[in-house]
Structures are given as C-alpha cells and as structure tokens.
Image (tube, helix red, strand yellow):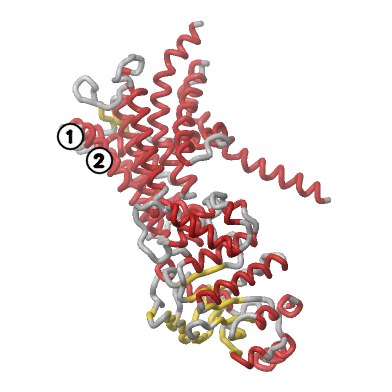
Amino acid sequence: MGFLTGLLNSMPGAISQGMIWGIMAIGVYITFRILDVADLTVDGSLCTGGATCVILTLNGVPMAAALLISFIVGLLTGLATGVLHTKFGIPAILAGILTQLGLYSINLHIMGYGTDNGSKSNLPISVDKYSLLVSARYVRELSLRNPVLILIPFILIIIGILYWFFGTEIGASLRATGANQNMARAQGINTDLTIVMGLMLSNGLVALSGALLAQYQGFSDVNMGRGAIVIGLAAVIIAEVVFGKIFRNFFLKMVGCVCGAIIYYVVIQIVLRLGLSTDDLKLLSALVVALFLAIPYWKGKLSAKSVKKGGN
Amino acid sequence: MLEIRDIYKTFNPGTVNEKKALNGLSLKLEEGDFVTVIGGNGAGKSTMLNAIAGVWGLDAGQIIIDGEDVTNLPEHKRAAVIGRVFQDPMMGTAPTMQIDENLALAKRRGKKRGLKANLSKADADEFKVMLQILDLGLEDRLTSKVGLLSGGQRQALTLLMATLEKPKVLLLDEHTAALDPKTAAKVLEATELVVEKDNLTTIMITHNMKDAIAHGNRLVMMNDGKIILDIRGEEKKKLTVESLLHEFEKVSGQEFTSDSAILG
C-alpha cells in the first residue's frame, strides 16, 4: 500500500516533468525525424535556455520576456550548429558536439553574469520572490498554479503554431529537405538554409524547455542538459512504439512526443520506487533507447531473411 | 535557349581515381529542341546534365540558359529554369510527403517561399486535372504518401513536377531505365506529351538506341566527355540502329560498349 500511495503521490511531479521535457522532445523530433539529422547541440542548449531564463528573471526581466528571450537564444545555438554544418562542412553530429562543448563555457558565463569571476555552475531562483510560470512547489495543489494545468494549454499552443508552420511553404520545404535533399534542391529549395532553420527551431524549443525546467526545479545547473538528447530520443521513440499506429496526423505525432516524455518520466518514477539507484538512471536510459532504436533494424533483418528463405 | 561552351570537369584530380568526365564539351540548343543523348558507359552523359543543373562547379567553361550565364549559380537557384527527372525513381520525390504536397513544392520552384499555406484548394483541383492526363489513377490519391507509389508512378509524378512550372530546359537522365518495358513505354509517352504541349527544350539521355532514334528532333552521341556526333532534322529520321552503330565506330574508332543499348 505504501508503495502505491508513494507512487501515486509522485505522479503529478513525473507528469509535469514529462510535459516540460515533452517540449524538448518535439525539438528532437524536428531534427531527428523531420530533418533526418541527429543533433547533439541539445545537451548544451537545454541549459542555455535555463540559465538565460533564470539570470534574466533575477535581473528583473518580466517572466514572459525571459521565456521568449530564452527561446531566441536557443535559436542562436541552433544557428551555430547549422553554420558549422552547412558552411564549414562539418558532419552534423560533430557540429552539434562542438556547439554543445562551447556552450558549456557560455552557460557558466551566463549564470555568472554580475559575479566577481563571471562564472557560475548553478543558479537558484525562488518562486517566493519571483513570478514563475511553473514551479514544483504547486505540483500537488488543486489550483490554477498547478504546473500540469498551466502546461497543457501552453504545450497545445506551441504544437498548434508548429502545425501551422510545417504546413506553410517554408515549413514544407523544410520537410522536403529531410525527406529527400536531392528532390528539394531540384525544386529550388536552398537546403543549407532549411537545415539551418530546422536546427534553429529545434534548439529554440529545447532552450524553452530548459527555461521551464529551471523554473520548475527552482534552479539552473550547468549539468542539467547532460544526456538530454537520450531523453528526447527516448520520448520520440516511445511515442512511435506506443502511438505510432493511432497518431498518424502531424499534430497528434507532436502530442505523442509529449506523451512519450510523460511515459518516460512515469516509468523512471516506478523503477526508482522499486529501488533503482538514481546513479544508474542514465545507464538504464541509454540501454532502453539503444534497444528501441535497434528493434526496427532487427525487424528489417528478420524479414529480409525470411524473404530469402521463401525465395529458395 | 541552352548553350554549353567548352566545359571541363575532372573528378578526384591528382588521385588514382582521377576521371576526366567532361573534356571540352560544347552544345547549343535552340528553343524547342528535343535532343536525345546516347553514348557508352562513362561517356559523360549524366555528368553533362549534372553540369547543366549545377550539382557541382565546373573546372572551366560556361553554361548559358536563355541568355543568362548560370555557370556560377548554385543548384537551387538554377532550378528556377530547369526541370529534372532522374534515373532513380527514388530521387525525384519526397517519399514521406503526400502527392499533392510534392506537387505544391514543385509549383513554387523558382518562386519565393513564404508563410502562406503550402497547399490550397485551388492547387489541389489543378493537380487533379494534370494527374488525370497521366492516366495512372493518381488523381484520386492526392493525399497518399508518394512512398506508396510504384517506380513508374513516381517517375510520371516527377515528370509532372519538373514541368508544372514551365522550365526553360528539361533534363531527363535515363528516366525510364529503371522501369519495366511496359511502364517505361508509358512514361515515355507521357514525356512526349508534356514536351510537345509546352514545346519544351529538352535533353533526354537514354541507353536505348531505338528510343533515341524514335524521339526528339536531334540526336547527339557522346564519347570521352565530348560530343562526337550530332544528327538532326531529316537526317535523324533516316537513322537506324545499325547505321548509328556504324557511325559510332567510325567517329570514335572503337566498338560501342553498352550491350543494352544495342539489344534494347
């Protein structure tokens, strides 16, 4: 009984966290699935968003503006990776790693703004002193301050805007670039530009997610984005495995990404309650994502084999 | 309409894989010319089309389309005046997007893309009429993913996309080579139809000498990155596979290397 009530008690927190990471997962979905690029910038840009939001709020910038600026700074991190990839000819994965590494220093400096040595690895922000959109403080409260209630419309608006964007001429050229670069260029699409735009949009969303996460947990930390890409991928893949057959429409696919992230955090809560050490969490995440990425590949191999057998 | 002036291209220069693909190639097309191109493997046929499309830069020479020097324009900018159909049916379409979405992308070739909806009702009606002409049953499947189509259907769709906005030059790179004979004939028929309808200036590479003779008003033969034979008008109408093979041996001093070209 104690286990169950404890688990139930932890659910609102897991769901809120999942929703915030869901925004990040949508960003990963844009690069990984739509653009067909694996972008590792996100491990850095998540913290960039959180650090930017916290330092701005601490310095008196209104919360909405702080969130917006975090999003814009996220766009810039994507721009950096995009330029490294398309103009410097560096493979996308490596370009992302380079940006991510560089962002580590930048994130320290963002959080150290105004301090003596200009560098800080952790920056707290209290919901008592500042108005924040979401906070873990109210997660079990039945009021309009509850993060779950705030995040539902917030995320639906984001998904709505993205749905509209990907239906526009520019959005369609972005999708075409991911589907077939050859065709895109033959149809007059500047694929370098669309790739940069996709990376920017993705990292903008990741930074926004980081900003909300920092608000929610009450601090930004230079390590908050470590392994973020794996969580994002996990959410995207869980969504495809669980909802792939029913969520075919693009709007629902993005909803699926958020649901995937929620499932991820609920499952994490369960295994933690079952006694798994938090130290082993990242190993578990990595194994789960590796397994889910491998399943389609194995399936393909199996069916290829059975076709061969049938042919003989 | 299209002028290729003395172009050169060497791949992997200075390595053991060095390949002189284009060797001082020149070719001039008048408006409405429909040129078929034949030549052995490695003659530089596809390389010539890629040079026109701007897939990479040239080592030397110039390419002029309708009076404008496009030699230094990137591929996506040249696409405004060039329609292309590739040999590989996978290359010309976006498989994860719908038929109407693919066509809508093609409709904006060479135009500025903004934040207007990519698909409109009016467009969809227009696409339906066009697909009806192809007669492949695609007009009722506008919202199907292109990945579900057969190779022939994809090539026909790519052809439609290449000509939806009238291109100044249409480049067909063995676009029926990967299809079964019946489908190939159908796609060729559709090609003939669209080229004639808009009087398109066209270059069609084919490995099939019969097709090369049967289509177009002009036939060029390539060897070693150059044009070695250029036959047009009445003279082309009199061509046979035998006389063409004979000509090839005469001008190149070697035997034609592609069996399929002779047997097909």
Of residues A286 and B22, the one nearer the viewer is B22
Horizontal arrangement in the rendering, residue A45 relative to residue B16 (left or right): left
Q: Residue at x 61, y 69 (%)?
A: B190
Local packing at callout 1 (Cα closer than 10 Å; few below 14, some 14-19, many 20+) is some
Asked whether the residues under the numbered discs 2 and 1 touch, taking CB atoms below 8 Å apart as contact, a structural biologist would say yes
Q: Position of residue A42 (x, y in %)?
A: 39, 41
Tags 2 and 1 both on a single chain = yes
| Quadrant position of residue B189 | bottom right
Q: Position of residue A301 (x, y in %)?
A: 69, 45
Residue type (three-letter) at the residue carrying disc 2? Ile
Local packing at callout 2 (Cα closer than 10 Å; few below 14, some 14-19, many 20+) is many
Q: Which residue is mark 1?
A: A61
Callout 1: residue from which chain?
A
Horizontal arrangement in the rendering, residue B233 relative to residue A221 (left or right): right
The answer to whether residue A181 is visible is no
Q: Position of residue B218 (x, y in %)?
A: 59, 86
Residue B111, compared with residue B43, is above or below; it is above
Q: Which residue is mark 2?
A: A69
Horizontal arrangement in the rendering, residue B94 relative to residue A72 (left or right): right
Toward the top, the furthest residue is: A1
Toward the right, the furthest residue is: A312
Q: Residue at x 50, y 68 (%)?
A: B163
Of residues A231 and A241, the one nearer the viewer is A241
